[in-house]
Image (cartoon, grey):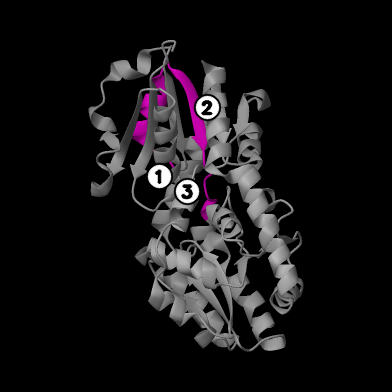
Amino acid sequence: MPNLPRIYILTPNVVPYDAIANDVTQMRQVLTRHGYAVRVFAEGIHPQCTAIAEPLAGAPARLWQSPGDILIYHHSMGWGLGEEVLFNARNRTIVRYHNVTPPAFFARYSREYQEACVAGLDSTRRIARLPHITVLGDSTFNCDGMIALGTPAENCRVLPPLHLTEELGKEPFDIPAIQRYAGEAVNLLFVGGIKPNKGHSRAIRVFATYHNEFNPRSRLIFAGGIDGRLRNYAGELQRLAARLGVAGKVIFTGPVTTSEIKSLYVSADVFLCTSEHEGFCVPLVEAMYFRLPIVAWGTTAVTETIGASGFVVDDWDEWQLACAIAEMTDDPDLANQFGALGRTRYQEGFSPRVLERKLCDLIAGLV
């Protein structure tokens, strides 16, 4: 085997059960398996992840000075320590762009979140003007954002996030969760942190229409943790559900284990996504894997992620989305058809085998 370049992966934080961290750790695993010497550096490292990542502050500066080696910089936020390395590196450089949430989503709820997003956008503008970088976006939507800021289109590539969906599929079922959501009631599911860009209020309005007009035996499940800094947002959602008469039918699970997540996917009837800003949305891929029919509002990268495997409304329409849910839940054959389309899209576009080949081809192209 010819001498291969060393690969250094930089990311602000490595924590368990995080989509970006999963992308980082799977990159490390794939590239190591293909013979590359890979090291991961981060500023925040969870105790469970100390075997995966090293503190960036202690890394020798000479690592970033070899033109023969490769630096993969994961960008989703402002990160002063990481930028100091990135802007002075002489390595062949890949910016893995996961998108930055627009600050306006957090303006009413958290100054800290808002300022972090502002810093992230400022960082994106600086990074986009760097010469000789390759941008590796999670989606075409992400790449288009970098191109609009000055990155040459020919320097942009798309690679969906590497993920742990099949490991999720191997988890044992959480029997209490299965029992809790079993029965005749229809379960609508959305998975993700309780954050303003995720469009929970829109999902509640769609659900209220479906619940009141089509099926009173139904519930909407939001699976994901609630950050204490966003308590006002969570309270606003609960008040909206009460005002629409569905307070007892909108469930906020709080933090969930991987076994509980798997059990929710198999217990659900429809995955409802009304997110207002997504750079990709890994839970959509998980829904495809579990053959869960998807009904979604086609914003940002959502349409691109789903493709033709789900029911997608391009222009916001609560009634149309509620009707689509009713069609899926009233017609098992239709639901199975969309479930099968999702699983096929997963296998062809998002399976670990496909993503591994794309990543290795990209790295080989740089070499």
Which secondary structure, mark 3?
helix
Kind of element beneath mark 2? helix
Q: CA distance from mark 3 to mark 2?
A: 31 Å
- Sequence order check: which comes first, mark 3 or mark 2? 3
Q: CA distance from mark 1 to mark 3?
A: 19 Å
List the residue tagged with mark 1: 21
Magenta residue check for 199: no
Residue at left 42%, top 68%? 173
Left or right? Give the position of 226 relative to 204: left
Residue type at the position of mark 1 = Ala
Q: Quadrant of residue 111?
A: bottom left
Looking at the image, tell me whether mark 1 or mark 2 is earlier in sequence order.
1
Q: Which residue is mark 3?
A: 117
Provide the residue span drawn in magenta.
77-103
Asked if residue 83 is positioned above or below residue 237 in the image, the reply reads above
Amino acid type of the residue tagged 3 in the rendering: Cys
Front-lying residue, 229 or 358 = 358
Q: Amino acid at mark 2?
A: Cys
> Disc 1 vs disc 3: which is toward the camera?
1
